[in-house]
Amino acid sequence: MIQTDEIVPRSSYIVLGANGIKIEVDLDIGHIASFTVRIGDQNTAPFHRVSWADDTSSSNDFDFGTAPHLERMSGDFFCAPFAASDIEAAPPHGWPANGRWSVFGNKAFKGGHRLTCILERTVLGATIYKELTVRDGHPFLYQRHTLKGGNGKIPVANHAMVFLPSTGLITTSPKSYAETPAAPLEADPRRGNSILKYPATLSDLTTFPKNDDNFANLMEYPLTNGHEDFVMLVEKAGAQLGWTTVDRPDQQDLALFLKNPSQLPITMLWYSNGGRFYPPWNSRHRGVLGVEDGCTYSLNGHAASILENPLSASGVPTAIELVPNGSVEVRNIIGAVPVPLGWGRVKDIVTENGFLSITSATGTVLNLSFDTDFLKS
């Protein structure tokens, strides 16, 4: 059993937990600082925290103007807007990923624990609430972000990261295609390196074109060493559940990401493996896969996402609309679970009667306690 009093929260951090799960939240920026699941005698903690987050040495000085979220980037965080804040002044990924959150409610209830925080800044006039819930025996964090009031449209996404010290096998719910942005993440070879072709669009995720006329399997990590790359995956129409899994064979565990694809039709994969040479990255950010579920026009920013664009013109929403006298919710779930030796790649995921059932390519099935109604609301 994991109890919330097993660790003493650091300044500006708060812990919530239930039987088998413990979460630590960085209130200064609203990130999930740590995430641990215990099933039986096995612990798993696949989510990433930047190596410099807790480094106070002078060698870790940040350049002037570094966005706050980069200083302690961790686990998962909510972005509003996703990418460039070019409508309302804010750091990249918006104030929810960079601003201070205050505790609004913190309550252990029968069978779980719920933490509610409020962002100390408004976004387009909206007040934003972060509700995080864990339940006994559920290896999941249920996240609900509520934007109350405000005016206008805004692209949103959660920004999770998995640490992959060796290899990773990625599986997703059916996607229509993968697409890279118009320009590489790192176009200047003095500052970094990207290896995929930009722009490019392909339905086969296993043979995506590279800039050297070879191909990359987007469903395996690493693609190579010393690169930063980004692709947008578009959910196939009609799906009831959107999901991504990242199997870490050497760690014998699985990271899980679940969403309602009608609200969050985009999954973005960020392959970060030492390809940025400038501070704070300094070629040391390696073995990281970002899994970012959202409603946004790739990483083109706020303005591009609320205007008509190729994605929205095809019927895929790229922003949510605020309700001046009401509210709008964004829900997602992240989780982690140990898997048996030789588990292999995930084949399918279904939900039914309070369980999430994961089937591997070898035919092994994991049945996990799960709130099947959470993403339906």
Image (cartoon, grey):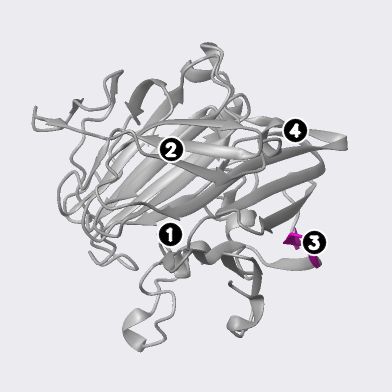
- Percent of width and height locating residue 302: 57, 37
Indicate whether 357 appears above or below 32: above
Disc marking residue 171: none
Question: What separation in Å lies between label 4 and label 3 (alpha carbons)?
Answer: 22 Å
Q: Earlier in the sequence, mark 4 or mark 2?
A: 2
Q: What stretch is highlighted in magenta?
A: 107-120
Question: What separation in Å lies between label 2 and label 1 (alpha carbons)?
Answer: 14 Å
Task: List the residue tagged with mark 3.
Answer: 110
Give the left or right position of residue 223, taking residue 294 as reference: left
Task: List the residue tagged with mark 1.
Answer: 47
Q: In which quarter of the image is the N terminus?
A: bottom right
The mark closer to the camera, 2 or 3, is 3
Question: What separation in Å lies between label 2 and label 3 (alpha carbons)?
Answer: 30 Å
Disc marking residue 244: 2
Q: Which three-letter amino acid code belongs to the residue tagged 4?
A: Ser
Q: Earlier in the sequence, mark 2 or mark 1?
A: 1
Task: List the residue tagged with mark 4.
Answer: 377
**SS at circle 2:** strand
- Circles 1, 4 touching at the beta carbon (< 8 Å): no
Q: Residue at the spot x=21%, y=44% of the render? A: 194
**Does 22 lie within the magenta span?**
no
Q: Characterize the local packing of mark 2: few (<14), some (14-19) or many (20 or more) Cα atoms within 10 angstroms.
A: many
The mark closer to the camera, 4 or 3, is 3
Q: Residue at the spot x=29%, y=60% of the render? A: 251
